[in-house]
Amino acid sequence: MTGGGPYALGVDSGGSGLRVALCAVEPDGAQGSEGPVPVAPPVRTGPVRTGPGGIDAAHLLELVLPAVEALLHRAEAPGTAPSGEVGAAGGRIAAVVVGAAGMATLGGRLRAVLPGALTAALGPHRLALAADGVTAYAGALGMRPGAVVAAGTGMIALGTDLSRWHRADGWGHLLGDAGGGAWIGRQGLDAALRAHDGRRGGSPALLERVRAVFGAPAELPGLLYPRADRPAFLASFAPEVAACAAADPVSAGILRDAGRHIAEAAAAVCPAPDAADGREEDRPRLAWTGGLFSMGEPLLVPLREELAALAPHAVPVPPDGDPLAGALRLARALARDEVRLPSDPALLTVAEPG
């Protein structure tokens, strides 16, 4: 594609890195089943720093602005090198949506600084900041009522009837995220250490995997507690639990409990049907998205069973797209004044630049 826009800009910032993509505001047929189609391959970078004051707005800008410049060159002048001049967007960006992990709880500084900084650099007409759960929702379901569970290292469920948001969990690995990757890994390590000690509830199979992955069980506290990325460390053991589940009842039980926790969160936020007659088109959609679900059937079977019991009115559907697709979908809708998802001070805030 060539031309000068206007473009919608989507940013997805998570613990594993940052992704930036552009799509046309007027799609001219470039609208797939997964939402707006990027005009060039997304740019990926390392993760944005997070400090005591929350998400580092200056570091996010350092990563986003060169990525936008590179994307504009890829879209409009394939084969040429970017100029390296930040701010060369020249008003071609009509709308920006930044979705970031931690926005709901650590995004205060970002909400204060980023709109003005992005407006000065890119000149968008409209701009919104979103929690990563909201971009996951928009990617999975678009602008329809329903519920989405986003699960990787952590776990959060968001639902809406399009009048307001409902949230369940997403409280972090110490206070919640029940059923997420860190939770599963923590339960698996507990079962391994129980077997090591000779306590009830232990799993010799998981103890064997601890020795294979981490070494001597007695070394685990020294490996875990000094780390700044303890949730990711715990989550790294979750695939071992899934791998043992077919032959190990303890591992299978951990995943059954995870499915129950995830289903409870989804049921808590899922809106009621639009009509009382139970027609499928009036029932809310429910999707799950995130790397946790790549564990497959050992987790998905109990999750489906629990959802059928706890949220029988919901229609399970595969997600249309991922959180970056959701950021793009929101940015394009923002540019066209078609956003139907509700605003919320912590989850989705829309600014009017300039």
Image (spheres, rainbow, N blue to C red):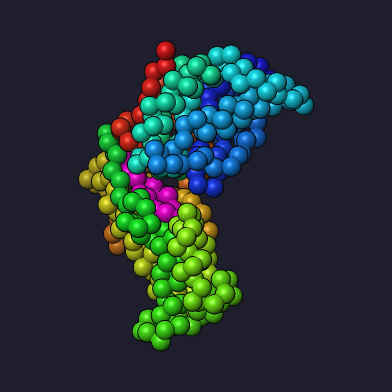
Q: Is residue 272 visible?
A: yes
Residue with the most extreme bottom position: 198
User: What is the chief secondary structure element of the magenta stretch?
Assistant: strand
**Residue in the foreground of this view, choosing between 80 and 319:** 80
Identify the residue at horizontal 42%, vertical 16% (top origin).
353
In the image, is 176 to the left or to the right of 4? Answer: left
Q: Is residue 103 visible?
A: no
Please give the range of residues in magenta: 143-160
Identify the residue at horizontal 69%, vertical 27% (top origin).
74
Identify the residue at horizontal 44%, vertical 20% (top origin).
116
Residue with the most extreme right position: 79
Rendered location of residue 212, percent (x, y) = 59, 75
Rendered location of residue 154, percent (x, y) = 42, 54
Rendered location of residue 245, percent (x, y) = 49, 74
Q: Is residue 227 above or below residue 158?
A: below
Identify the residue at horizontal 56%, vertical 71% (top origin).
214
Residue 106 among magenta residues? no
**Residue in the foreground of this view, choosing between 214 and 129:** 214
Residue 151 among magenta residues? yes
Specify the quadrant of the image occupied by residue 103.
top left
Which of the image's four quarters has the C terminus? top left
Specify the quadrant of the image occupied by residue 264.
bottom left
**Residue in the foreground of this view, choosing between 347 and 171:** 171
Rendered location of residue 51, percent (x, y) = 44, 41
Residue with the most extreme left position: 276
